[in-house]
Image: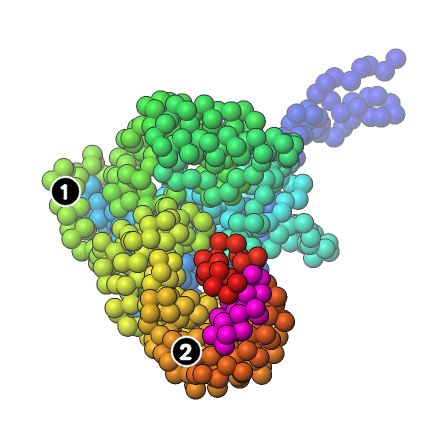
Amino acid sequence: MAPECRRSSVCDPVTHTPSDSAASPSLSLGKKLGFATLATLLFFGLLEGVLALIGVRPLLYSEDPHVGFSSRVPLFVEGYANTLITAPNKIRWFNDQRFAQVKAKGVTRVFCLGGSTTYGRPYRDTTSFCGWLRQYLPAADPSQEWEVINAGGISYASYRVAKLMEELIDYAPDLFVVYTGHNEFLEKRTYSGIIETPAAVRGMQSLLSLTRTYSMVSDILKTSNKPDSETPVLTEEVNTILDQSAGLDRYTRDPELERKIVAHYRYNLSRMVDIAETCGAKVVFITPAANLRSSSPFKSEHANTLTDAQVKTFQTHLANAQKAVANGHHSEALSQIDQATNIDQLHAHSHYLRGTILTALGKDKEAAKAYEQALIHDVCPLRTLPAMREILADTAKSRGVSLVDYHTFLTERSKHGVPGDEWFLDHVHPTIEGHRLLALELIATLEEQGLFANKSALTDSAISSIKNRVLGNIDNNAHGIALRNLGNVLSWAGKKQEAYKAVTHSLELAPGDAYAHYLAGDLASTLGKTDEAEGRFRELIRFNLDPKVATYFPEAHYQLAQIVGARGETGESAQLLTKTLKLQPDHAKALEAFPRVLETHGKNLLKTRRPAEAAAAFKQLEKWNPTHPMAAVLLGVALIEEKKFSEAIDVLTRATTNNPRNPTAHNNLGSAYARSNQPADAERHFKAAIQIAPNHVGAQLNLARLLENSRRNDEAAQHYAAALKLQPASTAAKAGLARTR
């Protein structure tokens, strides 16, 4: 029997005897897998290197699977002397910035990213938190040179911020400061099923997206497959829903879309961190803050489960609550608004009103919850939702990046524990002081993050000195105009009270701003402040502007005409309308109002025994509209009052010729003939008026008097009786009947 092979020998497969050749040890499965893995990693590592050399970029920071863009236009382009500057075609949305094309040694480069808050709206970069950072950082750490670049884009949402970061990582950034969340619902878009991918799978996709190999394979597959028609393609610059026709009407409650938008926000935040990591830059997120106490929701909708009867009852309670608030009866108001919110928990404005009532009653904690509910249920959510704040905190924690909780910071420093007008100029844009304090919070965070060589050297004295310098350089006129523009936007959005505050504040800074005077007048008029509106319009008219430049100037004349006309000053109203039409001949409302005001003015002049002026008004009316049914008739009356009987007969004859069936024209022509001692013609026209309109009391009385004067008492009595039957209280008819019987 052949001996067994030893483990160290190689056996002949036939004889089972030890082979003469050298033996090779067999590998375990684990070692085989290890070698295979190593070989695979080496292969893909080499492939990654080659792809990097030929310029293939990881898919993660070159593509968002949930939204695409029609083109890619850089924010920064080459300027003079080896600098990068804001592209001229981007100035509309971004601040004008400039920095070195090649970062110098010892420079720490900071990019501030986000939407209009980062930009500094309604003002500009100088008083934004980014501008304040630029001033405070050199004092906090003078050992290094700081470059702070404001890359905040007006109306930019998180997906646009992430897209912009793809460009900015090429400029050697050291730090990204990101304030984003208010603009997620500004643009219309849809989502494919990818947003629903489980978190674990999304995480694996994110890891793969960091590789250039995945990017190459994805590009190859795209060339052989049709593009995903469900992925929305957005324009290079923002095209907001509010800027489109219908504006707020386009917003409607859509919980499913809201859930997907919030999920996309989470994805974008994580993507920003990944993009920053590719160039070794750090990230600081800022939790967006909003005006909750002094800014009402943009749009409310009733729950779609309510019946018409429930909606009607809700509206009754809401109206009662508003009336009680106006009268200072806040306890009653709370009872009414509670009944309303019990019927409909989804109506944003009712929650907001409840918050204001609770604030007035000193119930601050309950009020805070009500304001938060108003924010949650706003159908046009232009403020960061509470769920998004939670996502931001969770992302910062899980990704190990710093977070400045600006929302909590302002909440702790606000009246009643809810941020309001003391910190905001509108629904989301902080005051200059709000921006400054945010910059100081960022300084403290950067110190904790180890970006300073030593402990911050920023002293109270330096903080105060920098503050005074920045505020001292503010152009009040420019800031006033910025506030006026803000008020205009708020007015367009239907937030009239908030718009009024912004515009009146703007006039404190820029009292010579004509457009602000117009807006203030228009808003005051809308809010029932008629006296103030009149004063604003009169101040504006004093400027005597060119309507080709100031298109609102004719409108100011028209609105002032409406105000003075409403209190019976028809003469000035007619003058103002005349000026309106001189400035803007096609002003539709003035064209409609002018003849009506002229007619009323002429009648008022007749009542006050000013027939010559009345005649002038009626002549203007007839000239304005030769076919006006009453112009010639009223002019005839004025001429009769002036005792210009011949002219009156000519005018009224023309009136009866143009409209033979006008009883008033015949009656007045009869009066003109009677006053000029032509009784036969007078009788003919009085009878014509009665034939056309038997119930014409004036014609019956006039004919009766004419007949009585001609001693035709029996006939006169008949017409006096007819007039008395038509108008039983007529003393003239009673007296005439008594005389002729």
Front-lying residue, 237 or 689: 689
Q: Is residue 715 magenta?
A: yes
Q: Residue at x 36, y 78 (%)?
A: 642
* Alpha carbon distance from label 1 to label 2: 80 Å
Residue 721 picture location, percent across and down: 56, 61
The answer to whether residue 620 is above or below residue 146 is below
738 sits left or right of 152 in the view: right
732 sits left or right of 616 in the view: right
Q: In which quadrant of the rendered view does residue 601 lie? A: bottom left
Residue 218 picture location, percent across and down: 65, 50
Give the position of the N terminus as an image quadrant: top right
Residue bearing mark 2: 640
Magenta stretch? 698-723
Q: Main secondary structure of the magenta part?
A: helix
Which structural element holds mark 1? helix
For disc 2, the neighbor class at 10 Å (few under 14, some 14 to 19, many from 20) is many
